[in-house]
């Protein structure tokens, strides 16, 4: 079945965790999402996605940003009490606009994504994804994305991955590779069926070093993130749930390293964006 129809009733079922976002989107929604970097490990094969870095014949590492929150809440922090997305007016992340498609999967395999999601745990009961061609709700026709809004969001998400790969992800991969001279050691640090999260610090240092304007933007981001982390941790302390403890520890760790990054960025000498990369980063993050 290569044709699917999609009719979202905004039931909120699939908003059961924070979304994957670009760093630029995290900057935009700094008061809503705690951002982090996810280092993942995937098999290297014909379907290895755009954002993966091959490590050896069999494995690749993925480096992406995403929003992080307490799993016990079971919902995206942007999901309002009325069940609607509170970011609608300001602009939802492209990953969410592309739903139920997965921008990381090539177009010719989107039918498999839709087949899986039409039965997936987060979507059960929503019945928003239906095989076949239904008038007014056609999303995928003969394997091709035909909904213009979804198609544009998929393309924007892929473009963001490509741009940010050049601006900071590639240099982080170099560090990971350097730190683990033996690539197999790097792989051993990553879970085989998930990802490891770290604070956004390496990305912020990479970008903030490029120009004073970018450093100021990163410092403002760190300040907003620190305030958000403190709010989220304070709420978790009030909830008094044992299963929140690990995330509280993680967030406190993020807060500490963000302060170190802030001090580093504040101490940098004044500089304007002269390199092509610095100008590109200013266009991407400050426009
Ligand atoms: S589960 Fe389906 S109907 Fe509900 S919000 Fe998500 S996409 Fe829309
Ligand atoms: S940002 Fe909005 S659409 Fe995306 S997961 Fe959160 S509530 Fe849902």
Image: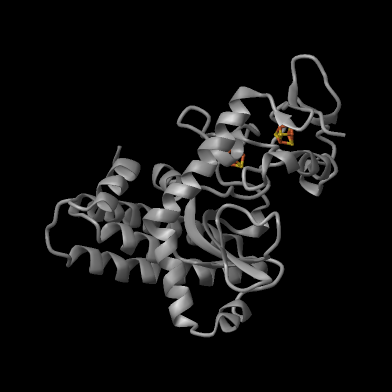
User: Looking at the picture, how far across and down is residue 121, in whole percent?
Assistant: 81, 48
Quadrant in which the N terminus is drawn: top right
- x 48%, y 55%: residue: 34
Q: Is residue 68 left or right of residue 136?
A: left
- x 50%, y 61%: residue: 37
Is 44 rendered above or below residue 83? below
- x 67%, y 64%: residue: 44
Quadrant in which the C terminus is drawn: top left
Query: 28 or 282: nearer the eye?
Result: 282
User: Looking at the picture, how far across and down is residue 253, in whole percent?
Assistant: 45, 72
| Quarter of image, ligand 2 | top right
User: Looking at the picture, how far across and down is residue 244, in whole percent?
Assistant: 62, 66
- One can see residue 80 in this view: no
- One can see residue 222 in this view: yes
Query: 84 or 59: nearer the eye?
Result: 59
- Which residue appears farthest toward the left when viewing the image? 270
The image quarter containing residue 195 is: bottom right
User: Looking at the picture, how far across and down is residue 176, in whole percent?
Assistant: 47, 74
Q: Is residue 151 left or right of residue 206?
A: right
């Amino acid at each position: 079945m290569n044709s699917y129809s999609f009719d979202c009733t905004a039931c909120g079922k699939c908003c059961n965790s924070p979304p994957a976002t670009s760093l630029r989107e995290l900057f935009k929604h700094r008061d809503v999402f705690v951002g982090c970097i996810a280092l993942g490990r995937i098999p290297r094969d014909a379907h290895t996605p755009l954002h993966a870095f091959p490590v050896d014949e069999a494995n690749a590492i993925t480096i992406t940003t995403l929003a992080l929150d307490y799993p016990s809440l079971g919902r995206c922090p942007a999901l309002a009490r009325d069940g609607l997305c509170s970011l609608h007016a300001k602009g939802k992340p492209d990953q969410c606009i592309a739903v139920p498609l997965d921008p990381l999967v090539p177009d010719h395999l989107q039918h498999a994504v839709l087949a899986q999601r039409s039965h997936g745990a987060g979507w059960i009961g929503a019945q928003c994804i239906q095989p076949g061609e239904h008038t007014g709700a056609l999303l995928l026709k003969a394997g091709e994305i035909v909904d213009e809004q979804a198609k544009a969001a998929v393309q924007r998400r892929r473009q963001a991955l490509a741009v940010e790969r050049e601006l900071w992800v590639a240099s982080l991969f170099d560090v990971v590779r350097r730190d683990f001279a033996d690539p197999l050691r790097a792989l051993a640090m990553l879970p085989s069926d998930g990802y490891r999260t770290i604070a956004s610090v390496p990305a912020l240092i990479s970008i903030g070093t490029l120009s004073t304007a970018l450093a100021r933007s990163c410092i403002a981001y760190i300040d907003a993130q620190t305030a958000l982390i403190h709010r989220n941790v304070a709420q978790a302390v009030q909830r008094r749930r044992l299963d929140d403890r690990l995330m509280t520890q993680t967030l406190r760790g993020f807060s500490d390293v963000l302060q170190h990054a802030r001090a580093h960025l504040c101490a940098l000498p004044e500089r304007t964006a002269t390199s092509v990369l610095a100008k590109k980063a200013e266009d991407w993050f400050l426009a």
